[in-house]
Image (cartoon, coloured by chain):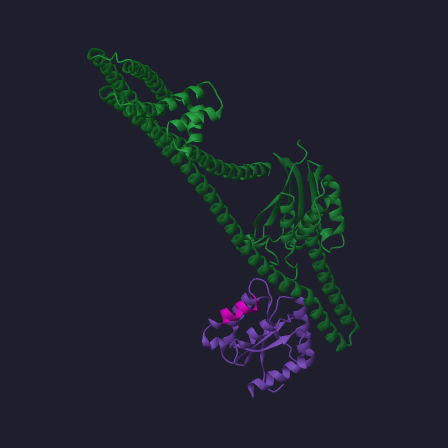
């Protein structure tokens, strides 16, 4: 991998967390994937950690989570300071096939793209690179 | 329920009564008006008749006096002619009192110069109202008048006789003229009284008619207004009912949309997880790791299975009728505990039972659902940091209710989430459940006319108290 990224996975399902980390390790050779169990933990992580590293951040955000879901996360994310939001791509994840939902999220200014679970990591990595080129 | 039915019946019979009142009032009004007009018309006919009577009588007297002075036979003839008028009325009166044939009566009235069209009314009024005060008084005057007419006739005959035999000397003549004059004056009074009495009667009847009309019209107006106001009230109530039903429908629709969205997510999620696990299995060579992935797949499928079971429980509770039968709480609780024996933590948890009651009258399917969900939660949310993990199940009677308490020393529920735990699809940790358990418990208890309350403190534990009505009576 040319550019180093920092990854944050915001996902409540433990099995899906496990799958993502394994896939990233095996396919993208990414050894560290940060994990937040819901939107609230995700916001907390960004607040605590974004300034600690200079690499671009990729957030994989699940739509359906307890306590704070994907949509609510994006709302709170918008309120964060600009320096916390620099050089960040957000990819939505969902097992939902609702096109209305998909379009709604694609229209959000912070969302780069919408991916259906299970994500094909190879496709994802291609899309990841093209964004920054 | 039956109170409402009785009230409804009263209401519809109320309306029926109103309609009958209106109908009767209209009918009575028509009848009263008809008869009053008939009476007034007959009264008028009598006054007309009196007019002819007195004119006839006065002209007869005039002709008699003229005959006395002029000895003109033509005057005598005219006198007889004119006298026939009041005499005719007299014949009619006597015939009416004697219940003679109508033809005799009518002939009498005809002689009295009454209008042909009035004859039936004259007879009708006399027959039906002769005892009514004002008419009775008038008839009395009439009787007196007829007596005087008879006396006048006798005097007339006397005069004629004396005239024919030329025995009419000035003294006798003077005497007869005086008698005639007195009679005529008396008759004048009678005739006046007759028409005045009839006049009074007419005024009385007119006033009565106006009052009755006003009375019945008021009744009709108020009945119709009352009927109208009832109808309008009903319309408004029914409109409100429709609005409420519409609002409920809109809410139900939106809930359905929510439901479909959540269900499709919870059903599809294990499948996407499974696909992901298969992907990483394909990339894996290590057998131990593969076995681990297979275990995770099983876990995922179990979760999906549980979710589907929960949906089925929800549906059963909604669809199936309540069956009240004898249920043994101790047996039910033991069965529920057995069902959870496969759970990894169960061996370490101390489960105590304190059942003061055993047999209750209730729906066993639903009690099973409730106990299963509550016990399952207590096991799922244990606090593994505590030295001893415990769950206690109590059952006892309280007033008109049975109470079942399930207490645990698990992780507890944070204050901010307490009011949401019975909401559909509400979870704090989605790995532990799908958020249907407590919702189904609440729905089930609603069907049983029961209740559930929770007492909980974070990191300390939770106590769920289920209340169901005591249908025993003991």
Q: Position of residue B201 (x, y in %)?
A: 34, 27
Q: Position of residue B165 (x, y in %)?
A: 29, 13
Question: Is residue B131 among what the camera can see?
Answer: no
Q: Residue placed at 73% from the left, 63% from the top?
A: B299
Q: Residue furthest right?
A: B287
Question: Is residue B91 among what the camera can see?
Answer: yes
Q: Position of residue B407 (x, y in %)?
A: 63, 46
> Is-magenta flag for residue A124?
no
Nearest the viewer among A113 and B16 is B16
Tell whether B296 sits left or right of B101.
right
Q: Residue placed at 62% from the left, 59% from the top?
A: B425
User: Is most of the magenta stretch helix, strand or loop?
Assistant: helix
Query: Which quadrant of the figure has residue B78?
Result: top left
The C terminus of chain B: image quadrant: top right
Nearest the viewer among B108 and A93 is B108
The N terminus of chain B: image quadrant: top right
Nearest the viewer among A66 and B308 is B308
Q: Which chain is green?
A: B
Q: Which chain is purple?
A: A
Q: Residue furthest bottom?
A: A133
Q: Position of residue B266 (x, y in %)?
A: 66, 64
Residue segment shown in magenta: A69-77
Whether B411 is drawn above or below B265: the answer is: above
């Amino acid at each position: 991998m040319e550019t180093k990224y920092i990854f944050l996975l915001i996902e409540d399902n433990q099995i899906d967390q496990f799958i993502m980390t394994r896939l990233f390790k095996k396919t993208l050779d990414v050894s560290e994937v940060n994990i937040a169990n819901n939107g609230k933990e995700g916001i907390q992580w960004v607040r605590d950690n974004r300034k600690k590293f200079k690499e671009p951040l990729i957030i994989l955000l699940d739509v359906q989570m307890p306590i704070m879901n994907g949509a609510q996360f994006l709302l709170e994310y918008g309120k964060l300071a600009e320096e916390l939001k620099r050089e960040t791509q957000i990819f939505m994840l969902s097992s939902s096939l609702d096109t209305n939902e998909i379009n709604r999220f694609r229209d959000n200014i912070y969302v780069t793209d919408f991916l259906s679970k299970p994500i094909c990591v190879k496709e994802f990595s291609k899309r990841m690179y093209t964004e920054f080129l | 329920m039956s109170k409402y039915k009785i009230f409804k019946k009263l209401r519809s019979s109320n309306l029926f009564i109103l309609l009958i009142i209106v109908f009767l009032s209209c009918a009575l009004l028509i009848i009263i008006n008809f008869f009053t007009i008939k009476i007034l018309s007959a009264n008028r006919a009598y006054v007309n008749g009196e007019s002819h009577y007195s004119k006839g009588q006065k002209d007869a007297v005039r002709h008699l006096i003229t005959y006395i002075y002029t000895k003109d036979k033509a005057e005598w003839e005219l006198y007889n002619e004119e006298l026939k008028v009041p005499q005719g009325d007299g014949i009619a009166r006597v015939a009416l009192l004697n219940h003679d044939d109508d033809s005799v009566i009518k002939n009498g009235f005809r002689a009295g110069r009454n209008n042909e069209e009035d004859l039936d009314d004259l007879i009708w009024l006399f027959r039906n109202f002769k005892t009514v005060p004002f008419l009775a008084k008038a008839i009395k005057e009439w009787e007196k008048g007829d007596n005087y007419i008879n006396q006048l006739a006798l005097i007339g005959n006397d005069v004629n006789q004396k005239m024919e035999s030329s025995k009419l000397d000035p003294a006798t003549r003077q005497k007869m003229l005086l008698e005639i004059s007195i009679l005529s004056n008396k008759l004048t009074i009678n005739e006046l009284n007759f028409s005045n009495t009839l006049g009074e009667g007419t005024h009385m009847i007119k006033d009565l008619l106006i009052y009755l009309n006003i009375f019945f019209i008021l009744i009709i107006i108020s009945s119709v207004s009352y009927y109208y106001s009832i109808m309008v009230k009903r319309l408004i109530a029914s409109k409100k009912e429709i609005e409420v039903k519409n609002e409920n429908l809109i809410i139900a629709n939106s809930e359905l949309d929510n439901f479909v969205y959540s269900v499709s997510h919870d059903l599809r999620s294990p499948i996407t997880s499974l696909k992901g696990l298969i992907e990483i299995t394909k990339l894996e060579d290590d057998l131990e790791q593969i076995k681990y992935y297979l275990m995770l797949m099983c876990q995922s499928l179990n979760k999906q299975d549980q979710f589907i079971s929960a949906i089925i429980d929800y549906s059963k509770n909604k669809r199936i009728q309540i069956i009240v039968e004898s249920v043994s709480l101790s047996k039910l609780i033991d069965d529920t505990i057995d069902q959870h024996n496969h759970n990894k933590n169960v061996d370490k948890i101390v489960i105590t039972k304190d059942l003061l009651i055993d047999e209750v009258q209730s729906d066993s399917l639903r009690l099973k659902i409730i106990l299963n969900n509550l016990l399952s939660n207590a096991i799922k949310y244990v606090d593994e940091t505590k030295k001893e993990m415990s769950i206690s199940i109590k059952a006892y009677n309280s007033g008109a209710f049975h109470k079942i308490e399930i207490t645990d020393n698990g992780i507890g529920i944070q204050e901010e989430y307490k009011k949401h735990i019975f909401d559909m699809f509400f979870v704090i940790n989605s790995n532990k459940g799908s958020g249907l358990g407590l919702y189904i418990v609440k729905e089930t208890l609603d069907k049983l006319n029961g209740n559930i309350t929770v007492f909980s403190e974070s990191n300390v534990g939770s106590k769920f108290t289920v209340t169901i009505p005591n249908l025993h009576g003991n």
